[in-house]
Amino acid sequence: MDAPEQGLLCLCIFSEIGPQGGGTLVAEGSHQVVARYLAGKPNGVGPQEGIDECNLQHPWLAALTGQADDSFLPGEDRVEKFMKRAYVDEHGTKLRVIETTSSPGDVILCHPFLYHTPSQNHSGVTRFMCNRTTPLKDRMRFERTDSTAFSPLELSIKRALNL
């Protein structure tokens, strides 16, 4: 469930990134789907194997990644199906693709389980950004006697798993 070197993903922004300007696309709620998937893998799973299996096991992710038909989603095109409308899965997780926009100096902190990908820059303006992983200070522990000791990352996973 945890890889100590993958605490948070930090998107560091060095230029203005407006709509359709090549910002990172993130799948809102996908970190909850991944947390539930990983909870069923107590012995761990390799990164690519986990991504491939998770894509196939969840209908919205399967449709998003082109592994399955998206006809169950309302809308006429992929932008409408995945970005303009949210899909709520059987666990109540709201899923939607969001394009990040930002200004120089912004840092976008992302959950390490969050699906994300670069997008095409249609603005004609060069954008500068980098992404870095921030390691965990300590391994995640979901069984603590002091509930105030949970990190925000641990709390988000506990919420996804209804712990």
Image (cartoon, helix red, strand yellow):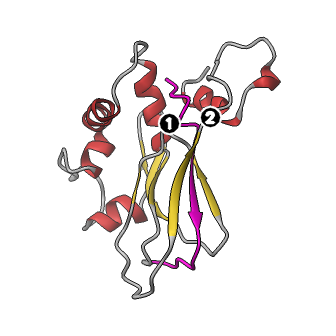
Percent x, y for residue 48? 29, 35
Above or below — where is 43 with respect to 107?
above
Front residue of 136 and 68: 136
Identified at 53% across, 77% down, the residue is: 17
Identify the amino acid type marked 1: Gln
Q: Earlier in the sequence, mark 1 or mark 2?
A: 1
Residue annotated with mark 1: 32
Span of residues in magenta: 1-19
- Does residue 66 appear left or right of residue 117 in this picture? left
Identified at 62% across, 23% down, the residue is: 140
Badge 2 marks a residue whose secondary structure is: helix
Q: Give the tally of numbered discs.
A: 2
Above or below — where is 117 with respect to 59?
below
Residue 92 visible somewhere in the drawing:
no
Badge 1 marks a residue whose secondary structure is: helix
- Does residue 84 appear left or right of residue 6 in this picture? left
Image quadrant in which you'd find residue 107: bottom right
Percent x, y for residue 42? 43, 13
Q: Is residue 72 one of those drawn in magenta?
A: no
Residue annotated with mark 2: 156
Identify the amino acid type marked 2: Ser
